[in-house]
Image: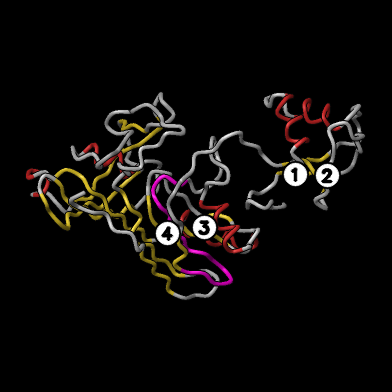
Amino acid sequence: MKVNSEGVSSSRVFLPQDTHYESLLEFFIQQFPHIDSGEWAARFTAGLVMTIEGVPVAANDAYRPGSHLLYFRRLEREPEIPFELNIVFQDEHIVVADKPHFLPVTPSGLYLQQTALNRLKKQTGIRALSPIHRIDRDTAGLVIFSVNPNERAQYQNLFRDRLVQKVYEAIAPYSEELAKRLPVTYRSRLQESEHFLQMEEVAGEPNTDTLVEITEISKPWARYRLTPGSGKKHQLRCHLNALGIPIKYDQIYPTLTPYQEYELDFSKPLQLLAKEIAFIDPITGNQRHFFSEKILNLNM
């Protein structure tokens, strides 16, 4: 893997021995039929296809079977996220970042350079950096990245085995009726809905659980402390919505609003924050406990 000047990681492709193509462009067009031929031509022109040594190759260069090439994605336009990504801890094993709202953790869709991963690669110079868990683009707060590829699985296993304690904060409507029942552990079964952006609750054995507590009240809003025991997509957003207190400025629950591509409304960030994360480091054996420096304004 190679990282370009913007911190973006490459992909690698092998040129098989048992096939023949008139040029490298022909190979890439045939190998990746879902990508427009004009896009591959543009990548060659921009120097985004290269040898393992990082030397750019041309679209009409000869096909050399048995070799590997690297290639990078190209975006004509990318949304600009004007918020800082802060590092709260770094050693030779992990980097803990405090992510702002709106910034994706990893490249996908319209986002390539404007991601936590690629910003951190540029900031730290660590090419092998990789997230060991994810939070939504809309959510702010703590994300942990592995420094060494051979240690990554050990950190990921902590999440798989539920050995990580995560605490979130959310601003949501105050409900007198619900407040009488809190704290409560809400459980339900979540699955993908017909719309890929939304999850839905269905009948059956619960596969998610969230401890919900109220920590501050400023009517008509309240601050909630959320401790998930599981880690399903949109779990916290779904659970608070099911309790009748959808998170403030949620653009997906209860109502899915049109997806914003480039003209983002930064004035209404989802009021959800990954506030704390704690675990025993599988490499050093040390107790780790990190806190986000971000604060959700109850009266915003």
User: Left or right: 206 with respect to 69?
Assistant: left
Residue 101 lies within the magenta run:
yes
Residue 230 lies within the magenta run:
no
Disc 4 vs disc 2: which is toward the camera?
A: 4
Looking at numbered disc 3 in the image, what kind of residue is underneath it? Answer: Asn
Q: Are marks 4 and 2 in contact (CB under 8 Å)?
A: no
Q: Are marks 1 and 2 in contact (CB under 8 Å)?
A: yes
User: Which mark, by number, is residue 68?
Assistant: 2
Residue under label 4, please give it.
Answer: 98
Residue drawn at x 8%, y 49% is 180
Residue under label 3, please give it.
Answer: 157
User: Left or right: 80 with respect to 28?
Assistant: left
Q: Are marks 3 and 2 in contact (CB under 8 Å)?
A: no
- Please tell me how crowded label 1 is: few (under 14), some (14-19), or many (20+) other residues with Cα within 10 Å: some
Q: Position of residue 150 (x, y in %)?
A: 65, 62
Q: Position of residue 292 (x, y in %)?
A: 36, 62
